[in-house]
Amino acid sequence: MNCTFCGKQAVYVRPYDKIALCKQHFNEQVKKRVQKTLTRYKMLKRSDRIAIGVSGGKDSIALLHILNKIEEDFPESELVAITIDEGIEDYREEGLFFARKHVEELKLEHHIFSFKNDFGYNLDEILKILGDRGKEREFGACSYCGILRRKILNKATKDIGADVLVTAHNLEDEVETILLNIIRGDIQRLARLDPHPRKIHESLVPRVKPFRATPQAEIVLYCVLNDLEYQEIPCPYSAEAYRGDVREFVFKTQEKQPMLSFNILRGQDKLLEIMKTTQLKGTLKNCENCGEATSGKICKACWVKTQLENY
Ligand SMILES: [Zn+2]
Ligand SMILES: [Zn+2]
């Protein structure tokens, strides 16, 4: 198969539009899609200090390199990396290693925050205290981890004086989140899944996902073709995730319907357009404990803390 653009040997054929790409054109297309996503949703401003969350996995490593390239054209803006150490034995160390390696290579500022320092407990400790899922513990490990990671990433972004937080969620991640919100009937949260950077509460920094239209397969290939090393082993707690079922559905169905994820993503964007006309009123309040955004009385991070303290 030859590259659709230049006729050279192709390294990849996109299943959703049958376009064949050589290495050079593959790289170009991946970067172009990120640029398009940034522009379409006005994700970044010219003089932004941009914080990117780098875990050391394929998504964040690939996005770090691509954004760093794009940034070269915007000298007034600045890219800085944040890594969160959740405290997961036999796992996080390796991710930290790859995160450090790439951030150093690109000569960027790197800020490392940890659950232990910012919350008082690391993830292993939290799960040990709360016991096994299904017996003593109500939610999966990823729920607790996600709640705290979101909170600490938000605080970290403010602490280092950044204007916006970039995360490397890819197309399928985004589609899973959309589907999960629909499955749970959580329309408020679905409405908050707006790709535009928005200040939905005074305590929350705007978050953007420049990879939201980039399929996972292309990210993996981008890393492989460009010799970007990343952490490949999955988190030891990932088996507990409820997300897994939806994830399996997305990837399985996608084999037969390559446009599936793009269609869902486009559907979400259209839905948001319609929702904009129906005013979503004051859905977020201040946490009674820490003052940060919450839809209830106290935020989820404070709720986890109460649980831990009651044990
Ligand atoms: Zn080509
Ligand atoms: Zn709180």
Image: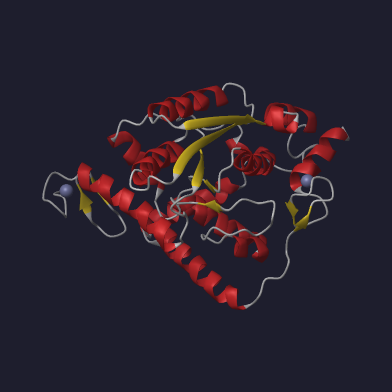
Q: Which of the 4 image quadrants contains residue 115? A: top right
Give the farthest residue toward the front. 76
| Residue 256, above or below 238 | below
In depth, the one of 32 and 177 nearer the eye is 32
> Which residue is pictured at 44% across the width and 41% down the height?
59
- Percent position of residue 306, x then y: 84, 39
> Which residue is pictured at 36% across the width and 54% down the height?
35
In depth, the one of 224 and 209 nearer the eye is 209
In depth, the one of 53 and 158 nearer the eye is 158
> Which residue is pictured at 68% across the width and 57% down the height?
201
Q: Is residue 127 left or right of residue 262?
A: right
Q: How is the image coloured?
A: secondary structure
Q: Is residue 100 left or right of residue 219?
A: right
- Percent position of residue 153, x then y: 61, 41
| Residue 83, above or below 13 | above
Residue 138 in view of the camera: no
- Percent position of residue 236, x then y: 58, 30
> Which residue is pictured at 75% across the width and 54% down the height?
294
Give the farthest residue toward the bottom. 277
In the rendered picture of this protein, how many numbered marks are placed on residues?
Answer: 0
Q: Is residue 235 left or right of residue 71?
A: right
Give the farthest residue toward the right. 310
| Residue 240, above or below 128 | below
Residue 29 in view of the camera: yes
Q: Quadrant of the C terminus?
A: top right
